[in-house]
Image: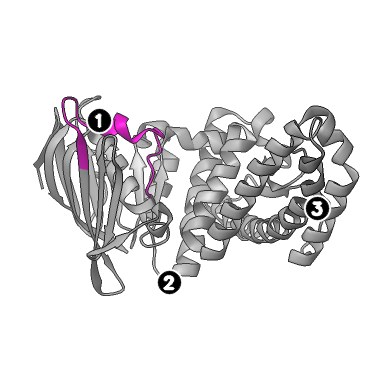
Amino acid sequence: MTVKNLKIKNFRNYEYLDIDFSENINILYGHNAQGKTNILEALHIASAGKSHRTNNYADLIKKGESSFELNLTTRLKDRDNLIKFRYVKNKGKHIEINGVKRDKLSDILGHFNMIMFSPETLEVIKGSPAVRRKFLDILLCQTNRNYLYYLQQYNSLIKNKSAALKKGKDEQKYLDIIPIWNEKISFYGGRIAAIRMNAVNILDRYMKTEMGKITAGSETSSIVYKTFCDFDVNSDEEYFESQLKKKLDKGIDNELNISQCLYGIHRDDFEVFLNDLNSRYYCSQGQQRTLALSLIIAELHYIEDIKGEKPVLLLDDVMSELDNLRQDYLIQGLYNVQTIITTTDSLALESIKNRDIKRFYVEKGRVFDKS
């Protein structure tokens, strides 16, 4: 998978941009607040349909304009593809893939895979369960179409059930439908739990290997999936479905008392351990960065296993977050991976030899090819 070209119109601080990328390493450098991250954001939106910085598309429109447009040309399995994403204020989104209009934002997911590694990625290691669920959901929605469908159905059911729990104290008809929703919640929740468990197990294996390489074997890592029940590696969809159904049947009074959905995969988490200690509480910032780096590279391997090609890696101002040892390790991992990096250092990755590095200077919403 490679990005060939990105065209931007009226996006953030860009009036217009037309940029061709190298298949190897691309460095966007310049002072802060010039528009480097905006380019990565545009790439991410065109590949995933969503910004990693805001949920409001209107925020992305250049001041004084009423719409923005992104055109992303990619190369996937020896074929060029064009993704068009346009948003018009008060009218909504328009999406095309290879000239075919798509009605759903989810149609973009999985068409072209990118991984974003930014200082915010550290929140996956040290932040809330919601951040880690989002990390898993993005990864799995890009690599498993069934997962995306299951998650959409599950979230819709939880939303409806939450409303019924609030109204059920006064109207019996809402109480009567909750058991029917619980059946369906158990069905989809069981499938989601099984997929998440398997994904975490695979990420755990890759992450162990990467941690061993980064630290020369001095530190070990593990990832542990946490959900609504106990399980083992042989647990399958039916097991999780039956366990969730039991939980929901037994806990209905508790849910009614506080009018909330207390049980299910919407409360999932995964814990990251370093040397058998929970990284949220016992790791230094340097160790958390190492864990985040190894997790991102594990994610890269995971996508490659499923898609048969490496995803594009977007690195947003992370070189300054890593010491020399971790920078060298990351650089070695960039071989055969198209990478787009933002940095304030014009000499970033100067030590790499025999590689195609394309450099762009970014200033006030304009990009200059300095290769």
**2 and 1 marks in contact (CB < 8 Å):** no
Label located before the other in sequence (3 or 1): 3
What is the C-alpha distance between the residues marked 2 and 1?
34 Å
Q: Nearer the viewer, residue 130 or 189?
A: 189
In the picture provided, is 110 more to the left or to the right than 184?
left
Span shown in magenta: 49-68
Residue at image point 64% right, 61% down: 195
Q: How is the image coloured?
A: one colour
Secondary structure mainly formed by the magenta segment: loop
Q: Crowdedness of circle 3 by 10 Å Cα count: few (<14), some, many (20+)?
A: many
Q: Secondary structure at mark 2?
A: loop
How far from the left and from the top, in percent, is residue 261? 74, 38
Q: Secondary structure at mark 1?
A: loop
Q: Secondary structure at mark 3?
A: helix
Residue at image point 56% right, 37% down: 131
**Total count of labels:** 3
Position above or below: 92 against 280: below
Residue at image point 64% right, 56% down: 196
Please give the residue where the numbered disc 3 appears in the rendered image.
Answer: 244
Please give the residue where the numbered disc 2 appears in the rendered image.
Answer: 308
Name the amino acid type tagged 3. Answer: Leu
Label located before the other in sequence (2 or 1): 2
What is the C-alpha distance between the residues marked 3 and 1?
49 Å
How far from the left and from the top, in percent, is residue 97? 28, 62
